[in-house]
Image (cartoon, rainbow, N blue to C red):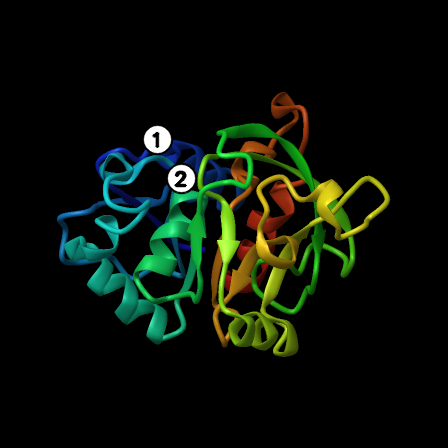
Amino acid sequence: MKSAVIVFPGSNCDRDIAVAFEKASGRKPHIVFHKDTELPEVDVIGIPGGFSYGDYLRCGAMAAHSPIMRVVRERAAKGVRVIGVCNGFQILTEAGLLPGALIRNRTLKYLCKTVALRVERTDSAFTTRYAEGQTIRIPIGHGEGNYVADASTLDRLEGEGLVAFRYVGVAGSTDAEGNPNGAARNIAGIYNETRTVLGMMPHPERAFEPLHGNTDGRALFDSLVESLS
């Protein structure tokens, strides 16, 4: 599997996702910068977490207009897999590659902890190594992770099976108990219509190896390798 990681001013999780790509695939990812206008031929593009452009205007709004994002849109339209984590998810919504938006957490506080997620489906390149309905534990670290969309968009995401991950409580409930940020319908991650673009607020690259204290995120990267190699 060949991969690339996009780096913006203020990205701070680019190395994390690059290490996960490399350890899962055995190949170093290409590091591509926001001002670049070309992208190597790759199977998957990672848009990392952080605070691109200092989160000015809205989180991800300025990064969405960086020169490299034109190329990312073109590759995504051709079926290249794209994963945006945390700020990467925000960038994908601002760039129009995913619907909805991410706004301030319900508590108006920055959250940094491990949360429980439910894997909603396993028929995407990102989730083949999980079981449908499996509960996994993945860290979050965000101040604007509250996913919102209008009712018709939310209904479409539900009806077309485009919800990738959902926040859940201890007993697997999808009520406020397990919802850390107020996200609509406990949505933690979504796909585009073809399930080739994934945006998620939790950080699977921070739950990749035993030294992290949790390896629940590794299956996502192993799924990509299995599906795209």
What separation in Å lies between label 2 and label 1 (alpha carbons)? 6 Å
Which residue is at 67% across, 24% downward? 213
User: Mark 1 highlights which residue?
Assistant: 12
Q: Is residue 66 above or below residue 81?
A: above
22 displayed left or right of 175: left
Q: Is residue 95 above or below residue 54?
A: below
Q: Which residue type does callout 1 highlight? A: Asn
Q: Earlier in the sequence, mark 2 or mark 1?
A: 1
Q: Which residue type does callout 2 highlight? A: Gly
Residue 49 is tagged as: 2
Residue 90 percent coordinates (x, y): 39, 51
Q: Nearer the viewer, residue 225 or 198?
A: 198
Any part of residue 135 in sight: yes
Q: In what element is the residue under mark 1?
A: loop
Q: In what element is the residue under mark 2?
A: loop
Residue 154 percent coordinates (x, y): 57, 69
